[in-house]
Amino acid sequence: MSTLPIVRVPFPHAHGLGSLLWRNAGFVLLVTGGAVLRVLAMLGFPPILWFTGDSYLYLTRTLRLTPSPSKTMGYPFLLKLLQPFHSLTLVAAVQHLMGLAIAVMIYALLRRARLPRWAAAALTVPVLYDAYQIELEQLLMAETLFTFLIMSAMTLMLWTGRRPAWSASAAGLTAGLLLGWAVLVRSAGAGALPVLLGCLVVRQVGWRACAAATAGCVLPLAGYAMWFHAHQGGYGLTSADGLYLWGRTTTFATCEKLDLPPEERGLCLKGPADGREAPGTIIWRKEAPPRRLPGGPITPDNNRLLRSFSIHAIESQPADYLSSVAAGIGMAVGPHRLRYPNPSTEALYHFPGRPHRFPPNRLLTGQLPGDAAHAYGRQNPSRVVEPWAGFLRAYQSRAFLPGPVLGLLFVVGAAGLFRRAGRAHRGAVLTAWSASVALLVFPIAVADFDYRYVLPVVPFTCLAAGLALAPRRRTAPAAPDPEPDPEPEAGADAEDEAAPPEQVRRGREVARAISRWWGSRGSLRRDSGRASAP
């Protein structure tokens, strides 16, 4: 009894998950170590860490979801999605997973750019092992979600290839929606929005993709502005940008140098600008001039007044304004970590030695912060568990990205803009580097320097530096024309002679195509040159 022969077809690129992990074993080990540190953070500081003021506002607004006049509410949207689980531990776990995913996206983009595995893995270390990054992920704060959304959008933008028009448009729309949500999570993302959309135009990805990305950005922002109007009586994202910009001017504005209309004169601080408190501190002082405005500083009319004063101050003293912005950038890349904007605020970026204490008499949207924490999490909202907490405090004193190294990464990324490479490669470097610059400079320019604002910059700086160092793509030489088929030997193709001529011709064409596409058994698939085009 005869049996049919078994035909084995080799597929050289049919790799499984195990093979993928093995080939990237170095990066897998780094991610595993980063995951262990994040588990220790959850064990040492359950269920989550608190940032005085902002964490309270986010949580109370989540329980009564309405727009805030002082902050955009994109982060409470995530908290609302997780609210049915009633677990602040879950919130922290999701944020830690986002931190790991950011590192994975950086590595994937750098490997796609053909950077060696060891170099691509090394550039994820500041994201995976910086203790301040891990502490920020454990905080009930918006920065981790903000960074994750922008990195996800950038991955879609940079994962280039030959796509049909509908696929490029879908990717652009998705990236735009992610960027729009990022701006709602932190309004500082507004500075990166036009930069990233402009990079799409520079990279010439096509008008459909650019239009889809723009529409994706506009949709969530327009929807939020209408929601804000329904509750606050004016179109916008917040009513506090004037207050923050006024704080920026306090580092240099001098009444004697300003030509102000009468209604704005009362907003000017008296005395020399030297020696004043940091903007991030002075705007919350009860004696600050904006706090004396009827109705407070965060109303539509007073917001316009503060914005007008700030613009007049910047126009009158442009050099002093630029000097104050440069001073903030200098702190970001400086060798020493300062207790700025004040010691109590900077201390919140360190793993604490004792549980958080909620204010007993501070109402936000009609609720005490401690009551809101219990209502959302249904658990003790703050604990410090040894020895894990002590280990992380010691780890944080040594394991962080120094400012000069961050500055060096900026320089390397900038050098990649002038490197002789293809348009697509320079466009990718421009996208990552310009996003990192915008995310660093914009908050300093419109508010103040804060170490919390620097941490979201790090992943994009690492990505830009890696793309700048990636090797140029070599154009494969054209393959020679295939040799003509040899004449068949007599009697060798008896079955072909019996088959119809058209069937024989098609069979030979398929055989030649398979030979060109896959190569011989055990060889690597050839995907360049005319002879290997599918």
Image (spheres, rainbow, N blue to C red):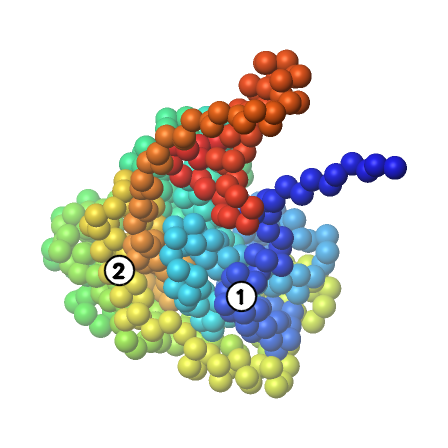
Q: Position of residue 196 (x, y in %)?
A: 35, 42
Residue drawn at x 54%, y 69% is 29
> Circle 1 sits on which residue?
25
Q: Position of residue 316 (x, y in %)?
A: 14, 50
Query: Looking at the image, is mark 1 or mark 2 nearer the viewer?
Result: 1
Q: Residue furthest right?
A: 1
Does residue 222 appear anywhere in the picture? no
Residue density around tag 2, few if under 14, some if 14–19, many if 20 or more, within 10 Å: some
Q: Could you tell whether 202 is left or right of 95 in the image?
A: left
Does residue 190 appear anywhere in the picture? yes
Measured in 3D between alpha carbons, the distance from the residue under mark 1 to the one under mark 2, in whole angstroms, is: 27 Å
Residue drawn at x 38%, y 67% is 451
Give the answer, above or below, for where 344 lies relative to 519.
below
Q: Could you tell whether 18 is left or right of 516 in the image?
A: right
Tell me the amino acid under the disc marked 1: Ala
Residue drawn at x 38%, y 50% is 113
Q: What secondary structure is marked by label 1?
A: helix
Give the answer, above or below, for where 129 lies relative to 506.
below
Tell me the amino acid under the disc marked 2: Val
Q: Position of residue 408 (x, y in %)?
A: 27, 66
Which label was assigned to residue 412? 2
Q: Foreground residue, 63 or 493?
A: 493
Residue density around tag 1, few if under 14, some if 14–19, many if 20 or more, within 10 Å: some
Q: What secondary structure is marked by label 2?
A: helix
**Label 1 or label 2, whichever comes before in sequence order:** 1
Q: Foreground residue, 499 or 344?
A: 499
Quarter of the image with the N terminus in it: top right
Q: Foreground residue, 170 or 190?
A: 170
Q: Position of residue 308 (x, y in %)?
A: 26, 44
Q: Foreground residue, 338 or 278?
A: 338
